[in-house]
Image (tube, rainbow, N blue to C red):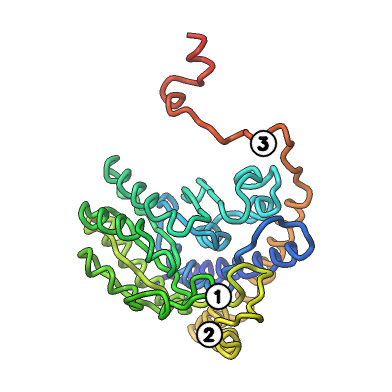
Amino acid sequence: MPLNRDQKLEVYRRMLRIRRFEEEGMRQFNAGSIPGAFHPSVGQEAAIVGACIALRDDDAMTGTHRSHGHPIGKGAHLDALMAELMGKEGGICKGRGGSMHFADRSVGIISESAIVGGGIPLATGCAFSARVRGIDQVTLCFFGDGAVNQGTFHESLNMAALWKLPVIYFCENNGYAFSISVAQSHGQPDIALRAVGYGMPGLTVDGQDVSAVYEAAAQAVTRARIGEGPTLIVADTYRFFEHSFGLSSSRRPYRPREEVERYKRDRDPIALYRSELLRQGIGENSLTAIEGEVVESVKRAVQFALSSPAPRPDTFADYMFNSPLSAHYGSVAELERN
């Protein structure tokens, strides 16, 4: 289904929100406001948003350790995301998850995980849940090229294909799992071909072209929603920064500097889509207005995060446990009283 004008502008808005949010996140990281690691997805915005825009609001999603872009691509608000990066109580996970463990039920994100491939079986289980509940909810599962060598990838795809589960397996293939190329780590570098072994469609798209990603994702969502089962989509994309912000590959370079600069200059997905929108007749003023709006929303998110309190030390165990019985019988304390 072609996107209308408003949807195209929303695509541009979400891509730009990811870029500006992460650029500010890197500044805050350097300022010492963000603890731990920070894995930017700058350069991969088209792959993320192109896939997310094909979903309904009530569709589910799992992400990766490179987790900031996924909730933004699905439409999440920025304030609680920035607060989570800073480990604040106002964060989407009350400051307990940090950069690699966003979970935002308001936009259908059931989990993001630092475990490579950790979201793949969760997405498969979520899709199985939709089948059991008799609803047409679809689950979108993001993972990187390194995850396709994990056992969970093969086990999950086999189960999903066998039971025709409504799940889209979406590989953000940025060419390098941490610091090793796909050619050096994959016996079959054409990742999409792995789908053949499980009897599901597999295709590769230009991950820097948000329109191409959307078209592929929309077709996969339609298949899943009408009961035809899973699809494997491989989006060839590129991260502009290191695996984790602050790391340096200067002592052991694993990708040519000219390659990085070429992608930044010629294959920036936001610049490419901006040019496409202008060619389609969307005015410069409309795009400029969105750009200003996004800058202001990121500023507000930083202000919210900086002013949000840190969790108290005596609450460190809060939210760690949940009794499955409480959903049916009330709290554990009530059960003990009875």
Q: In the rendering, which numbered label is found on residue 267?
A: 2
Disc 3 secondary structure class: loop
Please tell me which of labels 2 and 1 falls first in the chain.
Answer: 1
Count of number-bearing discs: 3
Q: Nearer the viewer, mark 2 or mark 1?
A: 1
Q: Amino acid at mark 3?
A: Phe
> Label 3: which residue?
316
- Say what amino acid the circle numbered 2 marks: Arg
Is residue 168 shown left or right of residue 68?
left
Quadrant position of the N terminus in the picture: bottom left
Q: Quadrant of residue 132?
A: top left
Q: Position of residue 251 (x, y in %)?
A: 65, 80
Name the residue that disc number 1 marks.
239
Q: Are marks 1 and 3 in contact (CB under 8 Å)?
A: no
Instruction: Give the mark, 1 or 3, whose residue is nearer the N terminus.
Output: 1
Residue mark closest to the camera, 2 vs 3: 3
Reply above or below: 214 against 128. below
SS state under label 1? loop
- Which marked residue is nearer to the observer: mark 1 or mark 3? 3
Residue at image position (75%, 62%) is: 28
Mark 3: few/some/many CA within 10 Å (<14, 14-19, 20+) = few
**Going 73% across and 36% down the picture, which residue do you hit?**
313
User: What residue is at 48 percent from the left and 83 percent from the top?
Assistant: 280
| Residue drawn at 35 percent across, 78 percent down | 189
- Amino acid found under the numbered disc labelled 1: Arg
Say which of 100 and 75 sits in front.
100
